[in-house]
Amino acid sequence: MRDDDHQRRLDRVLRKAFPHVPPGALARAVRQGSVRVNGRRCRHNGRLQEGDIITTPSWEAPAGEPRGEPPRASGSPRLEGDRIIAGSREILILEQTPHRIALSKPRGLLSQGQSSPGQESLDQIVREVARARGWWKESLSFRPGPVHRLDRNTTGVQLFALSIRGARELSQAFQTPEGVIKLYLTVLEGNLAEPLLIDLPLCYLNGKRKAYPRGSAPDHSGEEPLRYAPAQTEVIPLAWGSRSTLAAAIPHTGRTHQIRCHCAAAGYPLEGDRKYQPPDRRAGTTSRGSSQGSNRNTGSSADPYRNSPQGPGRYNPGYILHARTLIIPAIASWRAPLPPEVTRHLAKTFGDTEQFLARADTLASRGCAGSSRSGTIEP
């Protein structure tokens, strides 16, 4: 047993080590004595010690499926300087300690879970590099994983735990509203003149993969109950284009699609966010059936230059949502640079990027817009 397994309950270690085995089968094996610790029978809730030896039946994953691991893409991710190279992607390392790693997540990559065939998710990439570099020592009950999630097409600061200690510290911080400060940069449709505080409870429907403010969820069969949770987002304009606003969004809660849904509910949807645009605003966007429709803004394309309405090779960002800053006051702070193509796009539309980035960083250090807030949207 490794130190990450020390003082963990036996049943929880077994569930992590053998995710393909039903919990009932694990409990039955312990009860019947097929699982032993240091050669002795044990109880399912017994605490393990570093150095313990666990003997189990031959529980193997189905043929072709590594235990607990989704299929790997061809080629192995590797470390080059301060970056992880995974295929054509370069993932910047913002910080790395024995207990955590902070990365700048690229667009088009899942934080966690099963990705498309031949396409690893970010947690798979991190786990493979951490194992190869010795950042993570193999244990039965712990694997490196994200302590929060970013949507596939959201870029910026993403934290991963590399040990049980790191997971506990970071998870505890995320469980308290004042424990984490997050600031995102985004581009909104329309000209937002003053800061907004959007305070609308949200319900996320897994079947539709979409969030809804209270009272706006569509009629459904009732198979998925409507469960609204408090949600609050602060939106502060930083710069203006002819028909758009560059804004900082500070979510004070962590609901799925919170910023996208809240901004749309306030009348300022993210520019290019087809999922949350009102129907009357979708007329000017690329239709699903057109030759340009394979890179819909809610899709998974990782290539921002593909199918651009401006022609081949022209940048088409979809919606822009960048996790610029994440601060855990008791632990550390991290700041992710804008992707180069996004920087060029914003500079062309809004001018001097250094100026609005400096203001955004000042807002993040304060935690909110404070006295500059002038409008509130409530149910």
Image (spheres, rainbow, N blue to C red):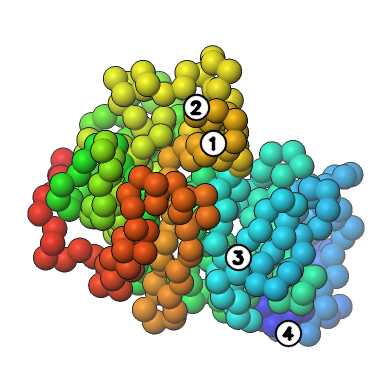
Report which quarter residue 164 is drawn in: bottom right
Residue 101 seen in render: yes
Q: Nearer the viewer, mark 4 or mark 2?
A: 2
Q: Which residue is mark 2?
A: 309
Point out the image quarter for the N terminus: bottom right
Please name the amino acid that badge 2 sits on: Pro
C-alpha span from label 1 to label 4: 56 Å
**Numbered disc in front, either 4 or 3:** 3
Image point 55% across, 71% down: which residue?
A: 94
**Earlier-in-chain disc, 1 versus 4:** 4
Q: Which residue is mark 3?
A: 92
Residue beneath disc 1: 314
Numbered disc 4: secondary structure? loop
Q: CA distance from mark 4 to mark 3?
A: 34 Å
Question: Mark 2 and 1 residues: CB-CB less than 8 Å, in contact?
Answer: yes
Residue type for callout 4 = Glu
Numbered label attached to residue 50: 4
The residue at the point 60 percent across, 48 percent down is 109
